[in-house]
Amino acid sequence: MLGDFSYGLFIMFSATPGQMAWLEAVTDPVFDEVGAILGGFPAFTAIGKCPRIGVMHLLFSLACDPDPQGRPYWLSTACSRCGAFDVKFRAEREQPEVFTVDIPEVTHVAWLTLDPSARTLRLRQGLDTYLVQRPRRR
């Protein structure tokens, strides 16, 4: 449970159970940079507005450093028990336990070592992979 709601504050999860990092998207310049780079790709802007936000959130992980086990953080909901990302429904069967944990801020050390063309290429490749693998509507 998060206290004191803050607009643009996200908890990012990795596939490692219990590994999280927080992101304050409104003040993170890399978040803006990723959005600006993606906005320059016609294939990205052709995606509907609501799905585009999800794609941006998915591809943002390419600009983030991994968790201590080397697994990427994702800006999507993962199961808090097993770390799976294909969560269809989330409900607690018992009263949630409230506790305090220290969650580190997401970092971008590796991203910041890349030159602009390498950053653009990384996102272009990520977008291409998404477009090939995304689920199709029937």
Image: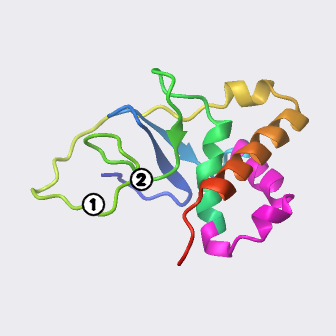
Instruction: Please tell me whether residue 28 belongs to the stretch shown in magenta.
Output: no
Q: Tell me if label 2 and label 1 are in contact, CB under 8 Å.
A: yes
Q: Name the residue under label 1.
A: 90
Q: In the image, residue 23 lies at what x, y percent?
A: 55, 44
> Which is more toward the observer, 31 or 93?
93
SS at mark 2?
A: loop
Residue type at tag 1: Arg
Q: Name the residue under label 2.
A: 77
Residue 93 found in image quarter: bottom left
SS at mark 1?
A: loop
Q: In the image, residue 79 lies at what x, y percent?
A: 32, 48
Residue interval drawn in magenta: 30-51
Tell me: 116 left or right of 61. Answer: right
Residue 118 found in image quarter: top right
Tell me: 29 left or right of 120. Answer: left
Q: Is the magenta stretch mostly helix, strand or loop?
A: helix
> Which is more toward the observer, 84 or 77?
84
Confirm whether residue 19 shows in the render: yes
